[in-house]
Image (cartoon, rainbow, N blue to C red):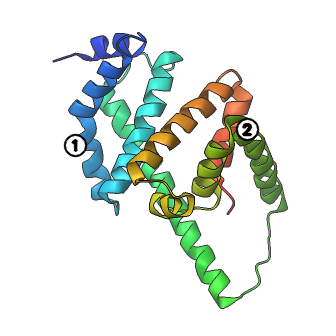
Amino acid sequence: MWNDVQILEALQDATKINQALGRLYDFHYGMLEYFILQNSGTESDAQDTIQETMLVFVTMVQKQKYRGDASIKSMLYSINRNIWLTELRRRKNRSKRDVIFESEKEIEIGDYSLELIKMEGYKMMMELFDKLGKGCKSILTLFYFDNLSMEEIVKKEQYSSEQVLRNKKYKCMKALTAKVESSEELYEKVKTALSHGIQ
């Protein structure tokens, strides 16, 4: 059994990080999955969300934004909850758009400033995605801005399985994080762009 201090130290050691991640999954996956399953999610949703949760947590540790003020369990639960609730809101917005499109109703955009922010965010994200390569750009655009599910992206991009796609998306997000972590302003813009998508 590893305690929190040992796990934090291992996450900052390139030779031990994979082992530490394995411990995190072993210790906390069930708890994180249970929350998602109890809140309208599937096992597939849980896999995606927990993967992103781990990426966010590891980044926080390596950038020394998490120093153990709360337990690792509490921090992972909080990150996991926020990511999943954001995803539920994203799906709700997508569902609303589908209803509007089907009824062919015209939409009057009342908040032009918000729309401008979204457009600027989209342009910035496309420029960043371009730097990650064609494969990453396609995956991240389809997921965050076209609101396609992992299953839909597998079919559209002809991946052999959802797990292969998840692994690719994880690597793309890790590369994206590395590009933006040097600038706090850029980090906030990226976070805003990804949370809004094109809505």
Question: What residue is at 34 percent from the left and 60 percent from the top?
Answer: 41
Residue 125, disc: none
Residue furthest out toward the left: 1
Disc 2 crowd rating (10 Å Cα; few below 14, some 14-19, many 20+) is some
Instruction: Indicate the position of residue 197 as horizontal and vertical percent values.
Output: 65, 55
In the picture, the quarter occupied by the N terminus is: top left
Residue that label 2 marks: 128
Question: What residue is at 41 percent from the left and 9 percent from the top?
Answer: 13
What secondary structure is found at the residue carrying circle 1? helix
Disc 1 crowd rating (10 Å Cα; few below 14, some 14-19, many 20+) is few
Does residue 195 appear in the picture of this structure? no
Residue that label 1 marks: 30
Quarter-of-image position of residue 72: top left
Compared with 177, 118 (above or below) is below
* Comparing labels 1 and 2, the label whose residue is closer to the camera: 2
Instruction: Indicate the position of residue 49 as horizontal and vertical percent values.
Output: 41, 46
Quarter-of-image position of residue 128: top right
- The CA distance from mark 1 to mark 2 is 34 Å
The disc labelled 2 sits on which kind of residue?
A: Leu
The disc labelled 1 sits on which kind of residue?
A: Gly
Question: What residue is at 45 percent from the left and 19 percent from the top?
Answer: 61
Instruction: Kindly indicate whether the residue at mark 2 contacts the one at mark 1 (C-beta within 8 angstroms).
Output: no
